[in-house]
Image (cartoon, rainbow, N blue to C red):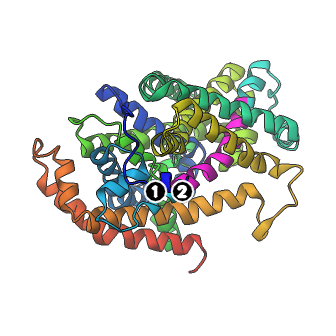
Amino acid sequence: MTEKILAAQPLPGLKRAGFTSGFGVLAATLGSAVGLGNIWKVPYLTGANGGAGFLLVYLLATLLVGLPVMIAEIAMGRQARANPVSALQKLAPRGQPWWLIGVAGIVAAFLILSFYSEVVAWVFAYVFKALRGSLLSSDRQVTEAAFAALISDPLQSLLWQWGVLAFIGSILLLGVTKGIEAITKKLMPILFLLLLLLCAFSLSLDKAAEGLAFLFKPDFGKITASVVLTAMGLAFFKLSIGMGTMMTYGSYFGDGQNIPVTAARVMVADLCVSMLAGMAIFPAVFTFGFAPTAGPSLVFITLPAVFSHMPMGQALMVAFFVLAAVAATGAMLSLMEVPVVVLHERLGWSRPKATLASLLVLMLLGSGCALSNNVLADFKPWGMTLFDLFDFVSSNLLLPAGGIFIALFAGWAWRGEGLKRALSNHGQLRNETLARALVVLLRYVSPLLILLVMLKGLGLF
Ligand code: PHE
């Protein structure tokens, strides 16, 4: 088995699928970047850390770290036309173990999916609860109790999570073109429509201006070193980089696809989604006198109470949780595709078999996270529940380490030349200067900056 896994080439006879249109490429890639992060992280962090000032720092971090690594990952994937493990073997100089980045990526995908799927499970459960009207209460204590009731129930937590995983697995069974591409092409327009609808309602409220001021008013005094590092970490995780997701999707890009332009579009659209989400959330939060928060307490406790104050609140609540479910679906598809394509290409398993095997592992690992809020609440290896541990190890160790090595690989081991050739579509595009600038960023700037984020994440300074 290990020999097979380490075999240098994907097994013969496997025809590779891919994305078939420019819009499909954009929808799938944006679908991966857009996720729960846009809804519960970026808007809040922007508001709490200096509004427009934070955005500026975040943008800078994206341009110096996020975008270069994203472009490199996609280019590597497309050049090798293989899963992350094989891709790195194909591109690396003989005998150098860069393929380990791919292996770390699979581990990261499993860990992230294990806790992410539990949060998505709550989102799906809330779609149904919102439809039934059982979340309608303008009292935050009531919505808090409702959330506690859901997460403290082991059976509900498990079943919703397994349902979500099976849902994502069933889309992957349809394949890259008919599954990932076709579905994200439908989901992305729905996402923007729902966002604009929610924004329109929220911005028409009395104290919308207060919410907008929270979100955008520049306060450069709030920008400390730790805020800069937060922005950098965020830029990096937002774009789903450092774990082979973008490499996998890059391997499905068409030969004529302009990689830097596509990556830049995804970055801008992802930022728009975050800002629109902020404009949908905070004007309403402020109008009804709630305090802005982040994470689960914002989405599952504050917002239901906020919506309950609004006219047509139930319909808007349903729209909001559908929006969150749509955003999370694209992200989860890209996460699960990583182990699926590795098993498929390295072991020669059929896609259904590879998907089922990944699903089984995820149900097992994921249940550790689903049970973290109830029966396993006191099981805390290294002082953290499994939910927090998986989040910590993937976000603070595996992704940044993956990002550093991908940058170093593209900048040094690939000698810059490989990257330049791949980005110009083998001479078709004239983007030499851009490619040269990217090589400099990848060689020196990105690895150093990511290392700083990583040390900070580990609490080393
Ligand atoms: N970018 C996704 C989000 O913002 C999360 C993600 C991370 C998805 C890594 C894939 C890979 O929610």
The amino acid beneath tag 2 is Thr
| Magenta stretch encompasses residue 260 | no
Residue 248, x across and y down, in percent: 41, 44
Residue 7, x across and y down, in percent: 42, 53
Q: What are the residue bounds of the magenta stretch?
A: 105-124
CB atoms of marks 2 and 1 within 8 Å = yes
Q: Is mark 2 within 8 Å of ligand 1?
A: no
| Magenta stretch encompasses residue 113 | yes
Q: Looking at this view, is 435 or 294 the one in front?
A: 435
Return the mark for residue 325. none
Residue projecting furthest to the bottom: 461
Q: Is residue 372 above or below residue 310?
A: below
* Residue 292 visible, this angle: no
- Specify few, some or many for label 1: CA neighbours under 10 Å numbering under 14, 14-19, or 20 or more: some
Q: Identify residue for label 2.
A: 2
SS type, badge 2: helix
Return the mark for residue 6. 1
Classify residue 145 as left or right of residue 344: right
The quarter of the image holding the C terminus is bottom right
